[in-house]
Amino acid sequence: MEKNRKTNGNDSLNTEENATRENRDGKKTIRFRPKDTPGIICIDRRTHEETVTISGSLVLGAETDELHEWIEEAIDNAAREVKERGGVVDQISAALAVTSTRIIAVSDEKPMEKEPPQKDVRISLAAVMTKIDPKEAGDIIRKALAAVRLRLREKNHPAQ
């Protein structure tokens, strides 16, 4: 399957990734992976004069008690790395949204309701920095989100 990625100039995904393939009849089919796909890190980078604004998001397929601590550590490390590279952090902030899905279905005449046991978590990071290369700034924020994703994977699937 050939993949075409819509990127924003630093090889990070924009709001969606698409995959193109041909079906049996030779017709092309395009499938989109929305930014809400668990595990996909999306980064958007904007610059204005010396100011770099980075927004990033990550959706995780599970919630854990340590998540707040991991995010604090990740943005603290990101701020430290920006300073080490000679940049100035105006602000790095994180927002967490926890959602659950409830399914209601009717078969015959009796409604049925189900709620899956896990909840999705969206982490949104926003960073405003100056005196740093925009690509480097985007890489730092991507690395922060990847660190949180890795910690959750390690917790859910410990090395044996």
Image (cartoon, rainbow, N blue to C red):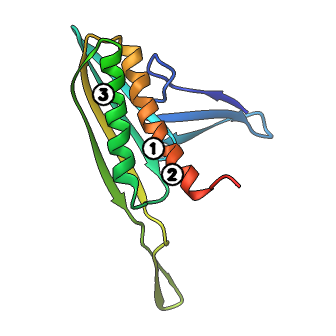
Residue 38 visible in image: no
In the image: residue 48, left or right of residue 30: left
Q: Earlier in the sequence, mark 1 or mark 3?
A: 3
Residue that carries the numbered disc 2 in the rendered image? 152
Residue 118: x %, y % from top left: 48, 67
Q: Is residue 49 above or below residue 22?
A: above
Q: Going from the N terminus, do you reach mark 2 or mark 3 first?
A: 3
From this view, report whether residue 138 is shown above or below residue 107. Answer: above
Q: Check disc 3 and report its element: helix, strand or loop.
A: helix
The Cα–Cα distance between marks 2 and 1, rounded to whole angstroms, is 6 Å
Task: Report helix, strand or loop for mark 2.
Answer: helix
Q: How far is disc 2 from disc 3 in space, using C-alphas? A: 21 Å
Q: Residues within 10 Å of mark 1 (few under 14, many from 20)?
A: many
Q: For the residue marked with disc 2, what is the amino acid?
A: Leu
Residue highlighted by disc 3? 79
Front-most of residues 62 and 155: 155
> Is residue 99 in view from this perspective?
yes
Q: On the image, numbered disc 1 is attached to which residue? A: 148
Mark 2 touching mark 1, by CB under 8 A? Answer: yes
Q: Secondary structure at mark 1?
A: helix
The residue type indicated by label 1 comes to: Val
Relative to 55, say whether 45 is above or below.
Answer: above
Residue type of the residue flagged with mark 3: Ala
Q: Residue at x 42, y 34 (%)?
A: 144
Q: Which residue is at the far left? A: 90
Residue located at (54% from left, 55% from top): 155
